[in-house]
Image: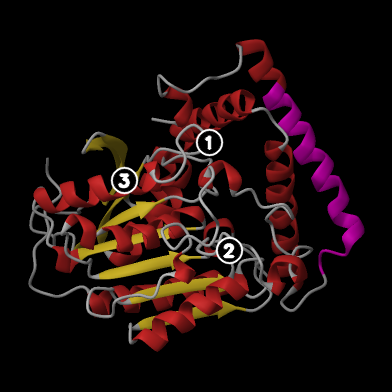
Amino acid sequence: MVMADRPDVRTASLPVAAITVVGLAESLVNGLARVPFRRPWQGPDSATENLGRAVTRQVVRSFMGYSMGLPIEEFRSMEKALDRICSVVMPPFVERVDGVDITSDTIAGVSGLWCRRREPAPDAEPARGTILYLHGGGYIGTSPMMYSAFAASLARGTSCDVFVADYRLAPEFPFPAGVHDAADVYAALIERGVDPHTLVVAGDSGGGGLATSLMAMLPERDLPAPAALVLFSPEIDLDLDHPSITDNAARDILPWNVPVTPYLHGVQPEDARGSAVFAPPDPERFPPTFVCAGGDEMFRDGIRDYVRTLDAAGVQVHYVEEPAMFHVFPILMPWAAASHDVVGHLEKFVTRHLRTGHRTSTAA
């Protein structure tokens, strides 16, 4: 399910939706036309890597800049159109490239997608763990299907089953709706027989922020901590008052005016329930944490502060920061050398923290 398919979410009429999609295409073409005039081959890496980074940055910037100017009804209609395209393209792609099957499921009333390795034989080793993945999108956009390629790569690399939850998004469903959805799915996975020692919570950007909010909610629901927490460029400081917010604005993919009001909906940005950087972790309950960030991303300083907070509290934390890379680069540039390095670190981290000898079940 994409947000536009929910009964309480308004969408634009078909003609307006079509015009919106055409406008997106024009914005992308306009953005790409600027790339050659910015010397995209120059940078810290090879000309090919630099060019790939420049093109990716411009495409995502054009998409975000165009999207943020749309009325919410048009935004949801455009999102639905992109989700439908991904629904056609992604399943055969990940099956061929990653050997992963995509199936739909509903857990605790929250729909989502499973990405599972296609086993070569009946006696093949079962999945060694389960990853609950909370997709990014600044708490306001994208869908599980749009994340299926990255989720499939996680399933292949970690040998885990990955469930991408279709949690509720703002502004239609502001904080704490998404956190409650994540907690409901987490609890239901355990009820299905998933051992917490083989359960990993992961997320990127807004989904990473949601994952940290989930960690704070688990004790309230008397739920055990997962085996590990994995965060890619997490949006965990909604106060947006660090120097990197302005210093890196010209180099990141994020819009200079990062929207947080639709999600917070009157909640203060420094509220620890939404901004984990203000929440001192309990080392007795907080799981080992993997954090990845780009040296050129706007959230960098807030992420560094969060890592220092975890470390000072005695939480096991593995931090990877890649120089000259922007927000969620492992997802947007999976071919880059920096992304391969992150994946290598992540696979070792997951292997180390998933306890052996625990079989996991994700059956309904």
Q: Is residue 22 magenta?
A: yes
* Observer-nearest of 296 and 345: 296
Question: Does 115 sit above or below residue 52?
Answer: above
Would residue 333 be found to the left or right of residue 91 on screen?
right
Would residue 258 be found to the left or right of residue 321 on screen?
right
Neighbourhood count class around disc 3 (C-alpha, 10 Å): few under 14, some 14–19, many 20 upward: some
Mark 2 vs mark 1: in front: 1
List the residue tagged with mark 2: 329
Would residue 246 be found to the left or right of residue 132 on screen?
right
Residue positioned most to the right: 37
Neighbourhood count class around disc 1 (C-alpha, 10 Å): few under 14, some 14–19, many 20 upward: some
Q: Residue at x 73, y 35 (%)?
A: 69
How many numbered tags mark residues here?
A: 3
Q: Return the mark for residue 57.
A: none
- Magenta: main secondary structure: helix
List the residue tagged with mark 3: 180
Magenta segment range? Answer: 20-41
Q: Dot 2: what SS?
A: helix
Residues at marks 2 and 1, CA–CA distance in whole angstroms: 26 Å
Estimate the x, y position of residue 57 in percent, counting from the top left.
Answer: 71, 57
Residues at marks 3 and 1, CA–CA distance in whole angstroms: 16 Å
Q: Amino acid at mark 2?
A: Phe
Neighbourhood count class around disc 2 (C-alpha, 10 Å): few under 14, some 14–19, many 20 upward: many
Q: Amino acid at mark 1?
A: Pro
Q: Quadrant of the C terminus?
A: top left
Do we see residue 254 in this rendering?
yes
* Observer-nearest of 93 and 212: 212
Q: Return the mark for residue 171.
A: 1
Q: Amino acid at mark 3?
A: His
